[in-house]
Amino acid sequence: MSGRRETIFTLEATPIKFGAGAVDDAGWEARRLGITRAVLVTDPTIVAVGHAERVRSALERENITVALWERSRVEPTIGSVREAAQFALDARVDGFVSVGGGSSIDTAKVADLVVSHPADVMEYVNAPVGAGRKPEGPLRPHLAIPTTGGSGSEVTTVAVLDLPAHKMKAGISHRHLRPAQAIVDPELLATLPGEVVSSTGLDVVCHAAESFLARPFDTRPRPDSPGDRPPYQGANPVADVWSAQALERGGRSLRRAVGDPGDLEARGAMMLAATMAGVGFGSAGVHIPHACAYPIAALKHEYLPPGYPADHPFVPHGQSVIVTAPAAFRFTYAADPERHHRVAELLTGAPLTAPGPESLPGALLALMRDVGAPSGLVALGYGEADVQALVDGALRQQRLLVLAPHAPDADDLAQILRDSMANW
Ligand SMILES: [Fe+2]
């Protein structure tokens, strides 16, 4: 390190095509990217509702050969992405098309990485869990088509994997993982159960709030080489614009989008919010709630979430994130009260009458209750006996924790987790 503070931030984003019916352009976009032979990465639920077939038809209309990989699983494991990568290698593809939630998009990102620059997946997993290797060059083109209003994975540089042998989740992050093009079509959200809209929408709200409240980019030390600049840079003026827009839309539309599957305007607004939040957090980064979410999702596999496929127990990502958000923002409040107030105002859509430390936690709790979120860690199967293991797991996510406006130590994290056992 040079000892100087950072003075630079970068803005990168996936080109996005948004609107009702946009998915029918999938073939045209894939062709434009130079794809002639694609793996279509998806999951059985997306096949069952017909979205995969719609994309396949659009690709075949442009004479693109399609190999269907329909075995992405919700919350992908390292084993499942290895299988997808092998399938893509065997199919000798020159591009990837993903249609599904963050899990399918992340599976395609990692399979693309392994096909483009062959190595074992663990080589690429962020250090210290993996070797943290950087891809030597760009990947094959990847067209990402999200079907949930949540992960924002279509515009980010990150893929998250479950490592069952380590009982933890870990990420792979590099700018080359960012898809070459995204198609965001609100029509694809019409079939999503309300519970999934709720969980993914709460994830969107957290992406936006965490990135808006992240430590400012110019408080980081400046790296010696541009190559050492982290993908998550800290809050910056451009990321703020996207995060603020996502908060406003999430606060205005999530309740409606959960309550009424036919409300395509609200569901479309959530999809747009998810993508906008993806651009914001893809630049600024997320911190405490997401760091805690990794062990919450990985430590126990007992919870069978309503509204999701019942083939394996797991904690949906959005739920693992939102449960600690009120306590996390209570903890970070003192670092920048004004910005915490601003997030609460954006979420509630109204000026605060008595701004204070409880304004933002209060706005989040009201939203969580209205959209049927679990009340806290106890509802997800955790108790006091698990606090130490959860703290240990969260502490491994230093890549995220360094972005907190007020960095937590082990005791702080234990307190945040204890405060999150039952939020009401
Ligand atoms: Fe997330």
Image: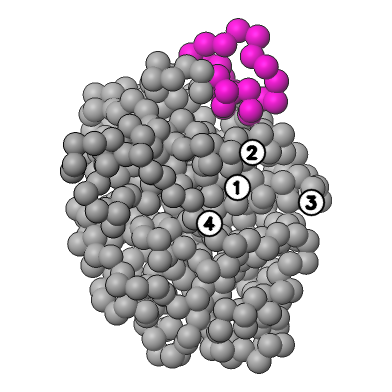
Side (left or right) of 184 relative to 390 = right
In the image, residue 225 above or below residue 63: above
Q: Amino acid at mark 1?
A: Met
The N terminus - image quarter: top left
Q: Residue at x 67, y 25 (%)?
A: 348
Magenta-highlighted residues = 341-365
Q: Which residue is mark 3?
A: 264
Which residue appears farthest toward the top when viewing the image? 354
Queried on whether the Cβ of the residue with tag 2 lies below 8 angstroms from ligand 1, the answer reads no
Q: Nearer the viewer, mark 2 or mark 3?
A: 2
Q: Position of residue 380 (x, y in %)?
A: 44, 39
Q: Nearer the viewer, mark 3 or mark 4?
A: 4
Q: CA distance from mark 1 to mark 2?
A: 7 Å
Give residue 130's quadrant in the image.
Answer: bottom left
Q: Which residue is mark 1?
A: 276
**Of label 4 and label 2, which has the lower sequence position?**
4
Q: CA distance from mark 1 to mark 3?
A: 18 Å
Q: Which residue is mark 2?
A: 245
Q: Is residue 390 in view?
A: no
* Element at label 2: helix
Q: Which residue is mark 4?
A: 13
The residue lying toward the viewer, choosing from 36 and 188, is: 36
Q: Amino acid at mark 3?
A: Leu
* Element at label 1: helix
Q: CA distance from mark 2 to mark 3?
A: 19 Å
Magenta stretch encompasses residue 353: yes
**Of label 1 and label 2, which has the lower sequence position?**
2
